[in-house]
């Protein structure tokens, strides 16, 4: 079977045709781009000219230069043209706050606010193809699948203008069929901060974790709720009592952000201490460890602000467990509460709070332990000293205390050991030296005894004498020793 081979002339004609099609397509694309650029420049110049004619410039609006005649001229323009004229000004609202009130009043006069509200709710006028082609964004009106862009832009404009009366419309937009519209509506509600809208956002948290999952994530809802003032904190109570730990933790995080970043109105948050302490005390003992940790952070922040607030403290039975729970939770993140803030908990009348404060010091590592040594040496409260000794023993810190004994006559470790001896707590030091780690340490100490300085040798000789004296007194005689000095 013979396969026919195309002639050379046929291949040449095919290549020429392909090249012609490619070149023609490229020229058409270039021409289209040039026409589009020309049309865009021409349209921008027209918009700028109209803005100048009607006084729609930031300086003109702020100085009130637009006249009633200009306003009457604007009223006869189509809404689509008005939107294009105001679009650049709306985008400057965030950088020029005085412009917001002027544009809000102007938009109300021109009927734009009402048009945006209807559009957010999905109420669009019927549009023919011919009408759509005459409007700048006409195709968005004509194609229903693209109308979400118009709904999102309208929700954004209502938020930029801080039109608080539009919050019910924006709240309904949280259940829009398109997630982009939901997100824009959420940001606008966060910008408005209308107190009546906060319960709506709290209800959305339930949807975010339930089977009826919406386009709003729990993270975006937390960020929106954190923008509300602390005076609205009590509206978070349903979320703090929610059966899902994710919602409880998110609500506690919102309280934490309110306490950390809201300086104006912080006293309003402290006014609710009696209520919040009960809720936070329950969260501090929550079954979920993440919820316990966040609740502890909030309690610590409120407690650190309470002394200087002049507010009436919460009842003791409500606040004691909360403060202890806060410090226990802070053990997992010790850097959150500064060392200087822990000390005031050591004078708390409740033993559980003092114990939690001592453990918080230990969780800070070497710096916290050194600060705890200083507290131990300065305090005259015997019960606090006994508590510190017990916690140091349980934390296994006593051996490291002995390892630094005698490095210098006035170092903290040497003073602490002397205080141990004077209190008759030598049995705890002996226990630390007689376990496996302690025996290895003693072996190394004796092997290199000649390398140690005289103060270190003297300190160890004094400790050995105190241990021998305690042994002679017997197990029942762990009283103060005369060799402490």
Image (tube, rainbow, N blue to C red):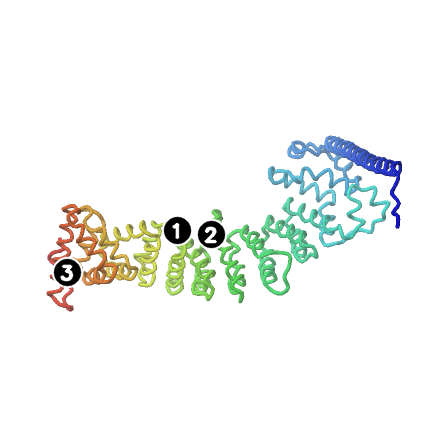
Distance, label 2 to label 1, CA atoms, is 17 Å
Secondary structure of the residue carrying tag 1 is: helix
Q: Looking at the image, how many numbered discs can be counted on the residues?
A: 3
Residue at the (45%, 56%) spot, across then down: 271
Distance, label 1 to label 3, CA atoms, is 38 Å
Residue at the (83%, 38%) spot, across then down: 18
Q: In the rendered structure, which disc, 2 or 1, sits on the residue that comes first in sequence?
A: 2
Using the image, determine if residue 433 lies above or below residue 166.
Answer: below
Q: In the rendered structure, which disc, 1 or 3, sits on the residue that comes first in sequence?
A: 1
Write down the residue under mark 3. Answer: 467
Mark 1 neighbour class, 10 Å CA radius: few under 14, some 14 to 19, many 20 or more: few
Q: In which quadrant of the rendered view does residue 311 lie?
A: bottom left
Please report contact status of discs 3 and 2: CB closer than 8 Å, yes or no: no
Nearer to us of marks 3 and 2 is: 3
Q: In the rendered structure, which disc, 3 or 2, sits on the residue that comes first in sequence?
A: 2
Would residue 17 appear left or right of 33 to someone viewing this image?
right
> Where residue 62 sits in the image (x, y, percent)?
64, 34
Nearer to us of marks 1 and 3 is: 3
Write down the residue under mark 1. Answer: 335
Secondary structure of the residue carrying tag 2 is: helix
> Where residue 453 sits in the image (x, y, percent)?
16, 45
Residue 40 vs residue 13, the one in the foreground: 13
Write down the residue under mark 2. Answer: 259
> Where residue 326 sits in the image (x, y, percent)?
40, 59
Distance, label 3 to label 2, CA atoms, is 51 Å
Mark 2 neighbour class, 10 Å CA radius: few under 14, some 14 to 19, many 20 or more: many
Residue 377 vs residue 125, the one in the foreground: 377
Secondary structure of the residue carrying tag 3 is: helix
């Amino acid at each position: 079977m013979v396969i026919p081979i195309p002639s050379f002339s046929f291949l040449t004609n095919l290549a020429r045709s392909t090249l012609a099609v490619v070149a023609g397509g490229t020229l058409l694309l270039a021409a289209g781009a040039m026409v589009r650029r020309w049309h865009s420049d021409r349209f921008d110049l027209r918009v700028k000219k109209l803005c100048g004619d009607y006084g729609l410039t930031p300086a003109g609006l702020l100085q009130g230069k637009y006249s009633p005649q200009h306003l009457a001229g604007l009223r006869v323009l189509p809404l689509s043209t008005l939107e294009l004229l105001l679009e650049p000004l709306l985008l400057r609202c965030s950088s020029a706050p005085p412009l917001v009130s002027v544009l809000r009043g102007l938009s109300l006069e021109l009927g734009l606010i009402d048009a945006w509200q209807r559009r957010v709710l999905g109420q669009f006028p019927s549009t023919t193809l011919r009408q759509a082609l005459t409007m700048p964004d006409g195709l968005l009106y004509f194609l229903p699948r693209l109308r979400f862009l118009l709904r999102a832009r309208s929700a954004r404009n209502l938020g930029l203008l801080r039109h608080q009366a539009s919050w019910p419309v924006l709240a309904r937009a949280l259940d829009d069929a398109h997630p982009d519209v939901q997100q824009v509506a959420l940001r606008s509600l966060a910008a408005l901060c209308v107190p009546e809208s906060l319960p709506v956002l709290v209800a959305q948290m339930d949807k975010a974790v339930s089977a009826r999952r919406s386009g709003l994530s729990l993270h975006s809802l937390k960020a929106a709720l954190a923008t509300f003032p602390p005076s609205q904190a009590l509206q978070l109570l349903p979320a703090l009592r929610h059966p899902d730990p994710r919602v409880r933790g998110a609500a506690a995080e919102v309280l934490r952000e309110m306490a950390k970043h809201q300086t104006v109105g912080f006293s309003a948050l402290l006014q609710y201490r009696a209520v919040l302490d009960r809720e936070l005390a329950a969260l501090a003992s929550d079954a979920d460890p993440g919820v316990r940790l966040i609740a502890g952070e909030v309690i610590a922040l409120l407690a650190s602000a309470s002394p200087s607030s002049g507010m009436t403290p919460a009842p003791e039975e409500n606040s004691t467990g909360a403060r202890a729970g806060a410090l226990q939770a802070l053990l997992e993140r010790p850097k959150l509460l500064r060392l200087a803030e822990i000390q005031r908990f050591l004078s708390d009348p409740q033993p559980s709070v003092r114990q939690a404060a001592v453990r918080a010091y230990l969780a800070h590592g070497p710096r916290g332990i050194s600060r705890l040594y200083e507290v131990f040496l300065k305090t005259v409260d015997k019960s606090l000293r006994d508590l510190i000794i017990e916690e140091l023993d349980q934390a296994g810190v006593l051996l490291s205390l002995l390892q630094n004994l005698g490095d210098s006559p006035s170092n903290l470790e040497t003073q602490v050991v002397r205080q141990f001896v004077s209190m008759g707590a030598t049995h705890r030091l002996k226990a630390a030296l007689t376990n496996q780690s302690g025996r290895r340490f003693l072996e190394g100490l004796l092997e290199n005894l000649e390398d140690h300085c005289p103060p270190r040798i003297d300190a160890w000789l004094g400790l050995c004498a105190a241990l021998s004296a305690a042994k002679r007194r017997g197990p029942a005689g762990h009283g103060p020793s005369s060799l402490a000095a």
